[in-house]
Amino acid sequence: MPPKGRIEVNEFYCKACNLCVDACPQKVIKLSQNRINSKGYHPAELASEGCTGCGICAMVCPDAAITVYRTVRSKEKSPV
């Protein structure tokens, strides 16, 4: 089962450059069509399930507007 992740976008810093959208290997980031930030841009957002928390979007963001969170799953011990 692939790891799960999520992102948080700081809308104040996002300038809708689309670099994170293009870089996402899972294709789960899009620019919001419903929100506009204080600078007049449509900020990036997580559009669907499937984020693995790889962090590529945060690495390519020139304004450090993205924080990535990855869910850590504990492995179940098998009975001895």
Image: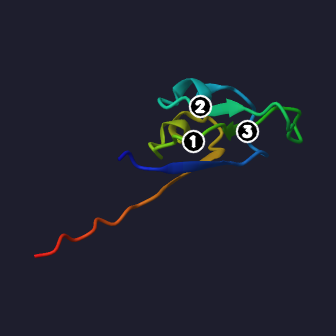
The span from disc 2 to disc 3 (Cα, nearest Å) is 10 Å
Q: What element carries label 3?
A: loop
Q: Circles 2 and 3: CB distance less than 8 Å?
A: no
Q: Is mark 2 on a helix, strand or loop?
A: helix
| Residue name at image x 57 percent, y 23 percent | 22
The span from disc 3 to disc 1 (Cα, nearest Å) is 21 Å
Closest to the observer, 65 or 4: 4
What's the amino acid at mark 3? Cys
Q: In this view, does 48 lie to the left or right of 70?
A: right
Reading the chain from its start, which is encountered first: label 2 or label 1?
Answer: 2
Residue 70 spot, x, y in % from top left: 47, 54
| Residue name at image x 58 percent, y 34 percent | 28
Q: How many labels were placed on the picture?
A: 3
> Nearer the viewer's eye, disc 3 or disc 1?
1
Q: Is residue 51 left or right of residue 63?
A: left
Q: In which quarter of the image is the C terminus?
A: bottom left
- Residue 32 occupies quadrant: top right
The span from disc 2 to disc 1 (Cα, nearest Å) is 16 Å
Residue where numbered disc 1 is placed: 49
Residue where numbered disc 3 is placed: 14
Reading the chain from its start, which is encountered first: label 3 or label 1?
Answer: 3
Q: What element carries label 1?
A: loop
Dot 3 alpha-carbon crowd within 10 angstroms: few under 14, some 14 to 19, many 20 or more? many
What's the amino acid at mark 2? Cys
Residue where numbered disc 2 is placed: 20
- Residue 17 occupies quadrant: top right
Reading the chain from its start, which is encountered first: label 2 or label 3?
Answer: 3
Dot 1 alpha-carbon crowd within 10 angstroms: few under 14, some 14 to 19, many 20 or more? few
| Residue name at image x 66 percent, y 44 percent | 65
Closest to the observer, 25 or 58: 25
What's the amino acid at mark 1? Glu
